[in-house]
Amino acid sequence: MRYAQSTFEAEDMLQAGFVKVFAALPDFRGDGSIEGWIRRIIVNTAISTYRQNKRLETESWQEGHDAVHAYELQHLEHEDLLRLVRALPDGYRIVFNLYAIEGYSHKEIAGMLGISEGASKSQLSRARRWLQDKILQVEGGKV
């Protein structure tokens, strides 16, 4: 869900990822954990799907696309935070997830997305600022 705009899109990403996992299973050498190997395939599939969808889009992301419910900051639950992350503009969301959640470096992210390291750092900084602003709005009930 961190890489998708909807449950439907997330399910498609997951299914496509597992098809790739099963097709590549004979190639797994056992050098690392199978969990890490599967995760990398799933994440790469999500990024690939994001790129394909981005090319198909004709309009840019519009603010407020995924409405966020107003809660006081102390009442933010996991689902509320996930909803905020899902509401991030696409580029911000992908870089934020890869860096903050998956633990990839800016160099790795740049290679995966075909962008510069500076662009990755900039997208992460903007994502953090965007999330901070949204959390402050939620805290103040201004969403």
Image (cartoon, grey):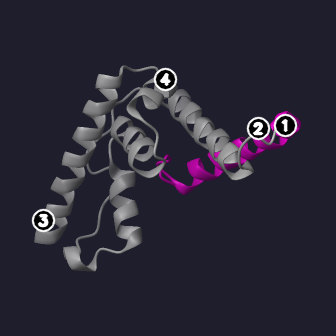
Q: Position of residue 48 (x, y in %)?
A: 58, 31
Disc nearer the start of the sequence (2/4)? 2
Of labels 1 and 3, the one closer to you: 1
| Disc 4 crowd, CA 10 A, few/some/many (<14, 14-19, 20+) | few
Q: Amino acid at mark 1?
A: Ala
SS class of the residue under badge 4?
A: helix
Q: Is residue 1 shown left or right of residue 70?
A: right
Residue 142 is labelled as 3
**Marks 1 and 3 close (CB-CB < 8 Å):** no
Q: Tell me the residue at 27%/51% (across/down).
A: 64
Residue 23 is labelled as 1
Q: Amino acid at mark 4?
A: Gly
* Residue stretch in magenta: 1-28
Q: Tell me the residue at 45%/31% (across/down).
A: 109
**Marks 3 and 2 close (CB-CB < 8 Å):** no
Q: Amino acid at mark 2?
A: Lys
In the rendered view, tell whether residue 34 sits above or below residue 80. above
SS class of the residue under badge 3?
A: loop
Q: Position of residue 141 (x, y in %)?
A: 14, 71
Of labels 4 and 3, the one closer to you: 4
Q: Position of residue 113 (x, y in %)?
A: 47, 26
Residue 111 is labelled as 4
Provide the residue designation for mark 2.
Answer: 20
Disc nearer the start of the sequence (1/3)? 1
Of labels 3 and 2, the one closer to you: 2
In the rendered view, tell whether residue 45 sits above or below residue 140. above
**Marks 2 and 1 close (CB-CB < 8 Å):** yes
In the rendered view, tell whether residue 121 sits above or below residue 139. above
